[in-house]
Each structure stands twice: as structure tokens, then as C-alpha cells.
Amino acid sequence: MLEEIKSAVGYLQNKTSFKPEIGIILGTGLGNLANKIEVELKIPYSEIPNFPQSTVKGHKGNLIFGSLSGKKVVALQGRFHYYEGYDMQKVTFPIRVFALLGVETFILSNASGGVNSSFKVGDIMLITDHINLFPDNPLRGKNIEEFGPRFPDMSEPYSKKLISLAKSCAQKVNVSVVEGVYAGTSGPTFETPAEYKFMQAIGADAVGMSTVPEVIVAKHMQKACFAISVITDLGVGEEIEEVSHEKVLVAANEVEPKVTALISEMIKSI
Ligand code: HPA
């Protein structure tokens, strides 16, 4: 895997000497932030050696280098999910690549189902912590010492400093936010009513199908992470409403401008 990662990084470094400081990974229906980037270089995933390919509707397949709010960023417009059939190494491949390109801060977004009874559809949740419910861990197997320790610390998976910055930026751009714990599951099924109850019982506020593997790998390399989850449906109460990918897309698209405004404001101060 190390060689595959290095060959992707080598390919990108041959194309550009651009050194991004911030890595951005946008979730379902939230890819529009990438359009605010002053593009230096846009590369389809298909051109990058060993890079996984996106298969989900609503996820574009481009790596974008450029400036956002005056900072050098690299963005993954469309991420890779475990449910697509990739193993955890592939799901987290771009995180390793970004880190080797110089990224020190990761900003991620996703769509999720709210299980906190005070949440509403359209809420923007700052992720304060996560619960890994995936059937695998991206760090299982031989540890690559070059990247990080065998047993990584996870006491601050989401940077407290960045959460605090997000709260002050949210006020500045007049966006209200909530905070909570994100449970990451493999999907692709949405939860049964009993599973939503379980999520609530174990201390989750929202449940989704991404982000956790990426944050684990970023933390392995001791990078700072910040993540936003848009609540696109609710798994609370006795009657759980039907949920579909289309519903998730519609709800995420609606809130997307607010998420974009918030992240753009934050990046100014990172
Ligand atoms: N469950 C899991 N993943 C999701 C959900 C959900 O309710 N909504 C959006 N992504």
C-alpha cells in the first residue's frame, strides 16, 4: 500500500508543485464548496495511479488543487465509501495522499440521520466525537511506522480548537449549528427502527456511512480533523419516516450554501 500511495503522490507532484495545507472531503450533496475554489489544477480520479473511482450519484470524481479563502487547499469532490466495495485501505487512500502532499488539517462533511430527539432535518452538526461501527478498522494489519504508531491515540479525534473556531465563525456568518457524536456504519442500508434506537442508546446523535475511517487514518498521522454532518433525515420517535438517497440529496443540497459559507469563513483563520 505504501508504494501505491507514493506512486499517486509522485504523479501529482509531477503535475504540480502546489503545496496544499488543508484537505477537504465533501459528502453527499455537499460538493458545491469545490466550486468556490480558485482552481489551480483539477485532475479526474481516473488519471491518478491507484486512486479509487467514485460510483455514487451526487459524488463527482475530481481532485481539485486551488485557493479557498486565501489558503492552499486540495479537495476531494466525492469520497469513497466502504459500502461501494472498497476495502478500508482504498477508502482512506486519499487521506494518506493528502498528508504526503503536505496537508496538516482535514475538513470533512457528510450527510447523516439524526437520532438526537432535539435535532431537525437541515441541522448542521459539528462532529465532536465518533463511534466506529464499521466492521473493520483502516489500521488493521501491518502498521506503516512511517505514517504513525501501532496504537494511535484517539482522545481528541476532532480538534477542539477547530470546533471552537467553527462556533465563532457560525455566529459571524449567521448560521446556527448543533454539536454531537457521529456513529459511522458500513451501510448501504439505512437503519431499521431498532437500529436507530440502538444508535441513540450508545450515545450517538447522528448516524452515517462515512468519515470515521478517514478520521482514524488522519489521526494516525497526527493531523487535525474537523467534520460537519448535515442532518438529512430523522431516526427518532415511534414512527420512523421512510428515507432514500434522493431525500438525503435534497436535504443536503438545501443546507449546502450554509455549510459552504461556514467552512469558507473558517478556512480564513486556519
Ligand atoms: N443513516 C445512515 N446514513 C445516512 C442517513 C441515515 O439515516 N442519512 C444520511 N446518511
Image (cartoon, rainbow, N blue to C red):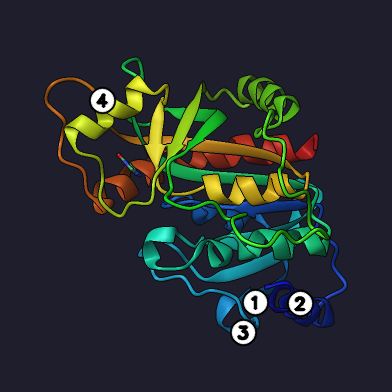
User: In the rendered structure, are the residues bearing label 1 and label 3 in contact, judged by CB atoms less than 8 Å apart?
Assistant: yes
The reply to whether the C-beta atoms of the residues labelled 3 and 4 are less than 8 Å apart is no
Residue picked out by circle 4: 197
Which secondary structure, mark 1?
strand
Identify the mark nearer the N-term, 1 or 2: 2
Q: Residue at x 57, y 22 (%)?
A: 174
- Which of labels 3 and 4 is toward the front? 4
Residues packed near mark 4 inside 10 Å, few (<14), some (14 to 19) or many (20 plus): some
238 left or right, relative to 198 = left
Numbered label tally: 4
- Amino acid on which the number 3 mark rests in the picture: Glu
Q: Residues within 10 Å of mark 3 (few under 14, many from 20)?
A: few
Sequence-wise, the earlier of marks 3 and 4 is 3
Q: Earlier in the sequence, mark 4 or mark 1?
A: 1
Label placed on residue 43: 1
Residues 209 and 143: in front is 143
Q: Which residue is mark 3?
A: 47
Residue nearest the viewer, comparing 105 with 222: 222
Q: Is residue 41 visible?
A: yes
Question: Type of residue at label 2?
Answer: Leu
Furthest toward the top, the residue is 118
Q: Decide: marks 1, 2 in contact (CB < 8 A)?
A: yes
Locate residue 167 relative to residue 148 in the image: left or right: left
Q: Which residue is mark 2?
A: 12
Cα separation between marks 4 and 1: 42 Å
Give the label on residue 135, or none: none
